[in-house]
Amino acid sequence: MAKRNGGIIGKVNTPTTSVAGGVWRLQDQFNARKNNIWPGQPYSIDFLVVAGGGTSTGNRSGGGGAGGFRTSTQSVGIGTVITVTVGAGGTGGLSPPSTSAQNGVDSSISGSGLTTITSTGGGRGDADGSEGGANGGSGGGGSFSTLGGSGNTPNTSPSQGNNGGDGAPHAGGGGGGAGQVGQAGPATFDAGNGGNGSASSITGSSVTYAGGGGGGTVGAGNNAGVGGTGGGGNGGGTDVTGVTPATQVAGTAGGTNLGGGAGGKSNFSSTGVVNSNGGSGVVILSVPTANYSATTTGSPTVTTSGANTIIKFTGSGSYTA
């Protein structure tokens, strides 16, 4: 007698067009074989990881240091979940003291089988001449003749950033940038410029990231520091000649998603004024379009450039290879 519905093997299941998560459909397999990417072999991804920039506050303050700037190219296995963390810029605090200013926040990428890449937040600039600029991806500028902070902290190779400039009497040094040290204040009342950032073409066009903030100064006619290319904020000052109360100008903010350091400012009086924030960081992945999985979290911006798909994270998220 003939067996029905598969006999002792069991009932025949009717095929469906849906599959469980992570399972390739027949059409996906066919397309992958046709494009020579089946079975899934590891492939290379280019990474750019930029941390948040530091801020500054208070009397004739140094500029904030830029966020660390790091690149990497790594082979990634199919199904690897790449976790992306994007650091915020440091928050500008009330002045004084400079301790109310903050370093930028680290950015990173990590995943099974990957070398974790962490870029360190930029150091805050000094105010009041009491502490010196803070260390970070790039160092914050000093003030009142104190020293700028050290960049490339912790040490990476190649370097992720540069030192901040030393302060001059009554003026701040510039924050360090990814491509250049911050300038020292050249003279009494004259502030130093922020260090320039570094360029990357990972998106298909050259963009400069991680510029240091210019130092702040005090007094009419004196030179505030100019922010470095790549999102460094300009320094501000206080005009104390013939104005009651003094006009207090905050430094401008670091560039958003560029990791720029905030510009320093001056606050000749003790009136509390909030300084601008450091610029937030960014993480960008460049994936061969033939391998792109389209599996992301965190709402990155996805574009194409040539044969690559560009995944730009301005907030934390993930990509599954």
Image (cartoon, grey):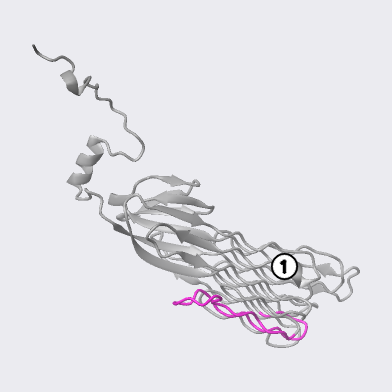
Which residue in the structure is indicated by mark 1?
101
- The reply to whether residue 6 is in sight is no
- The reply to whether residue 137 is in sight is yes
Question: Does 92 lie within the magenta span?
Answer: no
Q: Residues within 10 Å of mark 1 (few under 14, many from 20)?
A: many
Residue at left offset 22%, top offset 41% = 29
Rendering quarter of residue 127: bottom right
Question: Where residue 278 sits in the image (x, y, percent)?
Answer: 64, 64
Question: Where residue 192 sits in the image (x, y, percent)?
Answer: 66, 81
Residue at left offset 35%, top offset 49% = 79
Residue at left offset 22%, top offset 48% = 39
Q: Which range is magenta?
A: 145-173
Name the residue type under label 1: Ala
Residue 180 vertical placement versus 280 (above, below)? below
Question: Where residue 204 sits in the image (x, y, percent)?
Answer: 38, 60
Q: Main secondary structure of the magenta part?
A: loop
In the rendered structure, the answer to whether residue 259 lies left or right of residue 265 reads left
Rendering quarter of residue 210: bottom right
